[in-house]
Amino acid sequence: MIKALFTSASGMLAQQTVVDATANNLANVDTTGFKRSQVEFQDLLYQTVRAPGTQGANGAEVPTGIQIGSGVRTSGITKIFSVGNLENTNNLLDLAVNGEGFFEVQLPNGDSRYTRDGSFRTNSTGQLVTADGFLLQPPVTIPPDALAITVGADGAVSYTDAQNQSQQAGQILTSRFSNNSGLSSEGRNLFAATTASGQPLPGTPGDNGFGSLQQGFLERSNVQVVTEMIRLITAQRAFEASQRAVLTSDQMLQATNGMVR
């Protein structure tokens, strides 16, 4: 009965993790480029009273064993990198990756980070930057006299100058990873490469499996509110079931103590 208390407690903690992850998903339902999290579990060690396949008292092989589980633990929280809905913003500097790929940006200390948030702006020198001022890599500069800006599906950036001539401003590249789930979430819509994600592989949008760019669009969160609400209700019911097991174990202990008295 004491074992049941700890086993049930592990189930309650596991469902609390689900609620925490689901709450974060719902909080970011309108965050540009956000990727929802999915909690995964593993069962814990088993107390083996009798191993399957052992011989019984009559010498016959026992087809089943007696193993008592110890509960559950969180094995990982995986980011699901499915593409979110693309929303038309009519902003020429808003870019969405329709498929695989991340924009690379540079932090003030020179480190690289990766993002699906393509809501870019220009700084005082005309360079494309994020909302936090992080430079897009490789750098793209838009002159102040540019009359129109065009970003092709392949990432080629051009503009029309004061003489109504088309000029090239640069080339936007995106990066892919062998294991997107291995990226480290840094907040501010940024991911950092890790040994689990592998090294970034830069490439031209639209080529060799890289997603093409959509100018004037932003990728919205891939969180589905209905799915998250169902997951929240399921977690609540599972938490209540584990709580009920704790109460039942406590009542059995109480009854046992009463017998002693």
Image (spheres, grey):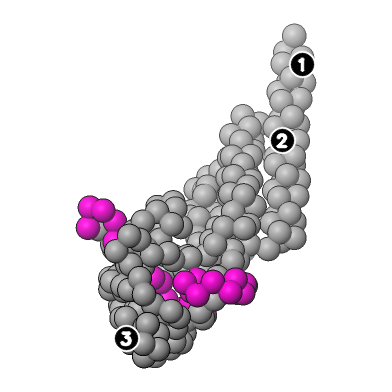
Magenta segment: 82-110
Quarter containing the C terminus:
top right
Between disc 1 and disc 2, whose residue precedes? 2
**Residue at 43%, 57% in the rendered image:** 131
Q: Residue 203, can we see it? A: no
| Circle 1 SS class | helix
The amino acid type, in three-letter code, at marker 1 is Met
**Residue at 54%, 62% in the rendered image:** 32
Q: Position of residue 159 (x, y in %)?
A: 39, 83
For marks 1 and 2, give the CA distance. 25 Å
| Circle 2 SS class | helix
Q: Which residue is mark 1?
A: 259
Q: Which residue is mark 3?
A: 168
- Quarter residue 256 falls in: top right
Q: Nearer the viewer, mark 1 or mark 3?
A: 3
For marks 1 and 3, give the CA distance. 88 Å
**Residue 243, which numbered label?**
2
Q: Position of residue 99 (x, y in %)?
A: 50, 80
